[in-house]
Structures are given as structure tokens and as C-alpha cells.
Amino acid sequence: MQQTPSQSPEPAPTPGTTSDREIETLAEFDETLDALGTLAHHRVQAVDLTDRTERLLAAEVAGAVFLGCPMRAEAAARVRAAGALVFPPVPGLPFDPYRGHVYTPDELFEGLSTPGGYEATPDARAYAWFQRTKTDGDVFASMLRAVHDDSVSDALDELLVGKRVVGVMGGHAMARGTREYAAAARLGRSLARAGFTVATGGGPGAMEAANLGGYAAPLADDVLPEALQLLAKSPSFTPSVTDWAGAAFEVRGRWPGGGDSVGIPTWFYGHEPPNAFASHLAKYFANATREDGLLARSNAGVIFLPGAAGTVQEIFDNATPNYYESRGEPTPMVLVDRAHWTERLPAWPLLQALARERSMESRIALVNTAEEAGEALARMA
């Protein structure tokens, strides 16, 4: 995120402080040099500088850091000699570890319509790379994953500044064409229309449904039921991710101009592709980082739709900081489907027991339908 440039020289910032300046686009690069005449102590992140050789040869760059920025050899040699750190792009990777922005569906699904289908997309190729390297003990591969995930976290924080984020959690098995899927989509739409940013785990099922609702929020009311009918023709990402994702892009093509929402998926669960209705996809290699980050950023509360082991884990991952108030005042937690959370997977009685006589007691609720969830969240807001 570009900071407002100062018109006078500043002392070198301490690494990790807010005075560090990040440059994430070519336009920001040019604007910074035009305004300040220096790149000293800036961080230039994943910007192609091959056509900015003359400016790099002339600019002050002491203390600057260039992360994954393509540049000509003479420019790279000069900025190193002038006191900058240069981390060159890593060839042969299906992802950019230094990326300055979260992903978009178009980026992750590029190539979906080619003969190779989903397997040809950057998303599938990144998962294949992860499968090859996750257990090979190569510290370089593990470093690349860590750098990538930290870059995604930084980009996600910048994206969500000032937003009221509601997390919607639920299982990946919820099929398109079901009443439950439609209810989750209506929930996402109502939350978005109420001014919240919907955030999900970014995958299929309940997650996709909530992101679909966020996409439909600024569109006419009749768009969502029509979209649900179209999607029902490809109810699941099995047996074909290509057909499943293709149906989502057909909806987006028929009704462009949808609303924003966030998906935070992971390549750890590579059998679950991301969904195409989250306008912003913060995809991680490390599932633990992704899980904690999703819940921590849900600053306006979390709604838990019926799910299995993963959703149960998310309930208590969220309950722990609410119990200890380690993130401040407890945020609302709404569990949806009484029978599911009291009989099939009785997480509710344990959550109640934890909350008893603590400040989080007034911040938890159990409701029967997704429609009631939004109302319960509003009462606790």
C-alpha cells in the first residue's frame, strides 16, 4: 500500500515499522520517483522494472529492497552497488512468492477454458508444486512457501483496512441445488447488503454459497435464484473441477458487476479448488496460517453453518481468543442448525460451558436457520 510521500528527506526507517514504504505497481514506482526523487528505504514488491532502467541507474536507492522485481542486469548491478537489496524473481515457479496483492479468480483459473482444463490453471499447477516439495526437506522450497504466505497476509491486511468483516464458515460438501446452499447464498447477500464484507474459507460448498451471495448483493433480486438454477447443473467439484468452475464463470459472465467478498483458501486441501465468486482470494500454502488469519480478521463476528471436522476446529479456534479476550472484546459467534450442533456434532453445549459467566457468554448464539443467523449477529453487534 502506497504511503503519502513526504516532501522532505526522512531518516532511514526501522525495518518493520509503518514508515517503510511499499511500492506494488509500476504507477506507484513512477509516482514515488516523481514526487520524491528517491527510492531510498522503500520496498518495491513484484513490479516489472525492465523498462525502467534509466530511472534505476539514476535514482538514490540506499536501503531500498527489491522483492522479485524483474530488471535488466546493469540496473540490478547498479542498485546493489548503491546500497539496495535485490531478491530476484525465482524462475520456474507457478506462483510469485513476492506478490503484492491477493489473487483474483481470473488469475487462479487462467487457462480453464483451454483443452487442459483445470489442470492447466495456475491454481492446479501451484498445488502440484506443493505436492512435489512439501515433504522433500528442501529449505529453499519451504522458504518460498513462507515468503509467499507472508506476502499474501500483508496484501490481505491492506485490502481489509477499515472493513467490517463477517466470517461465514461451513463444509465443502454442501452441494449446489440444495436448500442449504440457497440459504447460505441468501445469507451472504444479506450480510453484504448490510455493509459487511463476507469472508469465507474460499472453497466449495457453504463457502462458495456465501461468496455467491456477496457477488449477488449489488445485483437485482431475481439474479440470485436464476444463478442458483444455472449452478445446479454442476452440483459439485467432483468429478470435474473444470465443469464446476466453468458454471461459476458462466454466471459471472451473464451477470457482471457483482459485489466484493473475500475467500481465504489453502493448497493444503488441494482436492478443494477455490471458488470463483470471491472477488479476492488470499490463498495460502500453510493451512494453520490461513485458519488463524481468517478468524482473526473476522472482526464483526463469525457464522458457523453445518460442517464437519474442519468447521468444529474453526469454532474452537475462534472461541479460544474470545475466552481469553486475547484479541480484545469477544466477537459474536453464531452457530446455525440446532440439531447439527447439539446432536450430530454437539459443539454447542461445550461452547456454552466455556462461555458461562464470562464476557463471551452474551456473544454466542444458536439458531436454526441461516436466515436467523444475520438477525442474531445484528443483535450482538
Image: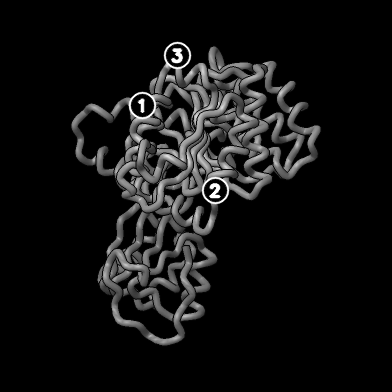
| Label 2 Cα crowd, 10 Å radius (few <14 / some 14-19 / many 20+) | few
Amino acid type shown at disc 1:
Leu
Tell me which amino acid carries mark 2: Ala
Q: Which residue is mark 2?
A: 381
Q: Residue 160, position in %: x, y?
A: 50, 53
For the residue labelled by badge 3, is the local secondary structure a helix, a strand or a loop?
helix
Q: Quadrant of residue 319?
A: top left
**Which badge, 3 or 2, comes first in the chain's sequence?**
3
**Which label's residue is closer to the chain start, 3 or 1?**
3
Q: Secondary structure at mark 2?
A: loop
Tell me if residue 87 comes above or below residue 205 in the rendering.
Answer: below
Front disc: 3 or 1? 1
Residue type (three-letter) at the residue carrying disc 3 = Arg
Q: Is residue 93 visible from the viewing direction of this image?
A: no
The 10 Å Cα crowd at callout 3, few under 14, some 14 to 19, many 20 or more, is few
Residue to which mark 3 is pinned: 344
CA gap between label 3 and label 1 equals: 14 Å
Q: Compared to 381, does 237 lie above or below?
A: above
Q: Is residue 324 visible?
A: yes
Horizontal arrangement in the rendering, residue 136 relative to residue 367 (left or right): left
Q: For marks 3 and 2, give the CA distance.
A: 29 Å
N-terminal-most mark, 1 or 2: 1
Front-most of residues 104 and 322: 322
Q: Residue at x 36, y 26 (%)?
A: 350
Residue drawn at point x = 65 percent, y = 26 percent: 183
Q: Which mark is residue 227?
A: none
| Badge 1 element | helix
Q: Report the coloring of the rendering.
A: one colour
Residue to which mark 1 is pinned: 350
